[in-house]
Structure formats: C-alpha cells, structure tokens
Amino acid sequence: MGLMAVKDQFLNLVRFNLRDGSQIRLWEDTWLRNQPLSYRFPNLYNIVRKKHATIAEVFSTTPINVSFRRALIGNKLLEWNNLIAIIANVNLQTGKDTIT
C-alpha cells in the first residue's frame, strides 16, 4: 500500500473542525456532518473540475469557486441546490483547521 493510500485511509477516519479551511478538502474530507460531501453528492463529485480543492480555495470568491465539466441539469441541479443550502452558512475563521 502506497503512502497516499495510507493517508487517504487515515483522512477517511478523522473528522475536521473548520477554521480557516486551508487544510480541509471540500469534497473528500469529513468536515460537515458525518460524511464527506463526495459521498453525499456523488453525481456532483463525479463531474467537478477540482476534486481536491480546499475549503479556503472554494470560498475565496463570490460566488464560490466550484466549476463542473458538464451543465447542471435535472438531478445534478437539485443536488447542487441542496449542497449550496448546506454550505451557505459556513464561515471561515482565523486559525488552523484541527482534527477531532
């Protein structure tokens, strides 16, 4: 098993406390509720351009910095609206992200 595989397994087992968002991957880390957004919104994760983007990168612009390889129509648009409703109240803070 390679180092990245071990790191990914470890990151799947931990939960993050969000502060500045620089250490947490939006889609792949567990930071909101009890599972990664990639599991909750697999249709969006499959077509997002930057799978490994950090929360800080995504929230660095308004509207948020997320783009997809395909148009969001039908179920994908519904998933996007649900995701936006979930993360709309997320506020970045000073300080480093931590692991719980």
Image (tube, helix red, strand yellow):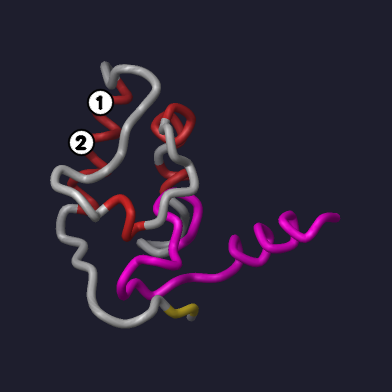
- Is disc 2 surrounded by few (<14), some (14 to 19) or many (20+) residues within 10 Å? few
Task: Find numbered disc 2 in the image and state the secondary structure of the residue it sits on.
Answer: helix
In the rendering, at what x and y percent does residue 62 appear? 14, 47
Q: Is residue 26 above or below residue 72?
A: below
Task: Find numbered disc 1 in the image and state the secondary structure of the residue it sits on.
Answer: helix
Q: Residue at x 20, y 36 (%)?
A: 81
Question: In the rendered view of the protein, which quadrant contains the N terminus?
Answer: bottom right
In the rendering, at what x and y percent does residue 57 appear? 33, 54
Image quadrant of residue 24?
bottom left
**How far, Cα to Cα, is label 2 from label 1?**
6 Å
Label 2–label 1 contact, CB within 8 A: yes
Residue 23 highlighted magenta (yes or no): yes
Q: Which amino acid, mark 1?
A: Leu
Residue 36 highlighted magenta (yes or no): no
Image quadrant of residue 97?
bottom left
In the rendering, at what x and y percent does residue 86 appear? 23, 51
Q: Kindly identify which residue carries mark 2.
A: 81
- Is disc 1 surrounded by few (<14), some (14 to 19) or many (20+) residues within 10 Å? some
Q: Which amino acid, mark 2?
A: Asn
- Name the disc covering residue 77, or none: 1
In the rendering, at what x and y percent does residue 47 appear? 44, 27
Q: Is residue 55 left or right of residue 46?
A: left
Q: Report the magenta residues as a range.
A: 1-30
